[in-house]
Amino acid sequence: MKFLATLAAFTFTPLVAHVANAAVFQDASSLPSDKQYDIIVVGGGTAGSVIASRLTEDPKINVLLIEAGPDDEGAIDLQIPGNFPDGIEPKYHWNFTTTPQSGLNDRAIPYDRGHVLGGSSSINGMVYTRGAADDYDRWANVTGDNGWKWNSLLPLIKRHERWSGAVGGRNISGQYDPTVHGYDGQTKVALPWSGPNAFDNLCLEEAKAGSEFPFNLDPNSGQPLGLTWVQSTFGGGERSSASRAYLHTSVRQRSNLDILVNTRVTRVLSVGNVGSKDFRTVEIGTTVGALRNVTARVEVVLSAGSIGTPHILLLSGIGNKTELDAVGVPSTHELNDVGKNLSDHFSIFAFGTSTAPDPPPVDHTAALLQWTQNRTGPLTESVVPHQLLWTRLPSNSEALQKYGDPSSGPNAPHIEIALIWGPNFGGAASLLTPHSRGSVTLASSNPFTDPLININYLTHPFDIEVLKEAIRTMKRFYSAPGFSSFIATPIAPDPDAGEAEFEAYTRNSGVTALHAVGTASMSARGAEAGVVDPDLKVKGVKGLSIADASVIPYAPTGHTSAPVYILAERASDLIRSRY
């Protein structure tokens, strides 16, 4: 952590104050024993931060927000966008690992989540992509609730966003559509400090020349297909995490909000008579501290994410009875789909060499000084490229004809390509519409034992066929005449140069996008499948709801941060409407 050592040498004066007050409790023993809460929100990540903030806008609703990780107050390494991915302290990571993946030649791969207030929004790559309007319309179709349609959600989308232009104030005319953004919300969204560079302009020339890859003014219009500029959750030179956006100073000063950090919720428990199925009590504690219970007067909201939420439900005895019996957890409510239907995006890298010279090295000391003084410079953006290419398989694709189309509709991309240029050219190709499904299950009844995370990557043949098409798409993009003088060697791996070799490379080297969804999916009211109804209440019980990425039934065709913000905004309205 050489960068952190350099970081410690500077004295920082934040541009925006972010000061905690006495409502933030550092451990469970300091939480008042005589205070009653209307709602307990479990998990202070993206969704939990939104919900706690929105609910406490009503002074009559008392909320306790519980986060397993530490407070982000004063964590400068979390505020600097350029710290992603290697400059963030280990204590802010869950550091999960998947089970050996049969589709990846039995590799077990790291599966990180944010272990801090703000959750993964405090440590992620900050890419802000809402996905296709078709994705949300499918949520509405699956649940029978038109409130989940894209057009119904648009006011909430704009309510959460604070469009911030570009870091440093450069001219961004023609790089976004001002009509599709919100300007008065909490989450800052911006374009990067630098750009367009020579490579960006080459890509634009190809897109605007009428190729199969048209220029798309704004990926967040609900129609993401084409070449787009990358928008990110930062502004004013700082990361705009869920905590910093929704739990800032004035929110923390609300008398009806308490925040408890460094504390695990181990189970939800029913209140009243045995078998009441009124799950309004949470059991909390740490590996070294005694457990205690806190009961909500009205409702518990699980927002612990696609890994944490099913883990808590299963430890509580809510899940498949046979599987619970196998690890010694008594069944309290049989709900077979808890922890099932896990889906995620999967990525591979493909590169050729270019004739471009090596870029000058970044002077991190100078860059940090610049960031400290005025929040500008290279540390105001992450390693994410400036442009993304979103595309679909052709309608006559053999993969679609053989396996069906798992996408939500004609405007939803199957593939995302992050375009990268330098001494190497190529990019990261991501599968957005996997057929494969995995699970989160219990390793034991000990709540402090990590769950078994089986994403089941590439276990369906469709998925690897799409990745082959993604590399073919990348090759076609770079075959434009404008790139010819810059290419020294072709892109590899190349499925057309050897499918067996390509498949071996993909299974041995592919990486997760960390976009897990679906482990507590929403479904139609009365449906046997699924875990929550359209109003996000857990099926068959009282006093318990879920609002986080786990309720999203299909992987969105975009990075999951924005869809979770949107879902949480509606969840807060649904919960508040019940009182």
Image: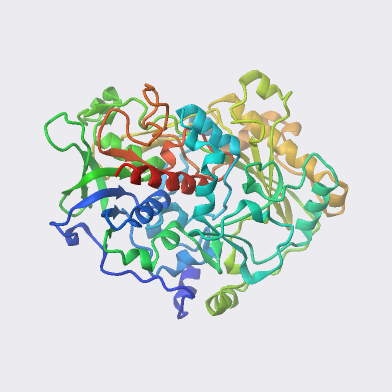
Residue 260 image offset from top left, x and y in percent: 27, 58
Residue 104 image offset from top left, x and y in percent: 53, 34
| Residue occupying image coordinates x 68% and y 33% | 468
Say whether residue 311 is left or right of residue 213: left
- On screen, 261 above or below 454? below
- On screen, 169 above or below 181? below
| Residue occupying image coordinates x 78% and y 52% | 203
Say whether residue 445 is left or right of residue 192: left
Residue 31 image offset from top left, x and y in percent: 19, 59
* Residue 99 visible to an observer of this rendering: no
- On screen, 424 above or below 521? below
Residue 235 image offset from top left, x and y in percent: 55, 65
Q: Nearer the viewer, residue 394 or 523?
A: 523
Q: Nearer the viewer, residue 142 or 505?
A: 142
| Residue occupying image coordinates x 75% and y 44% | 491
Q: Nearer the viewer, residue 426 or 201?
A: 201
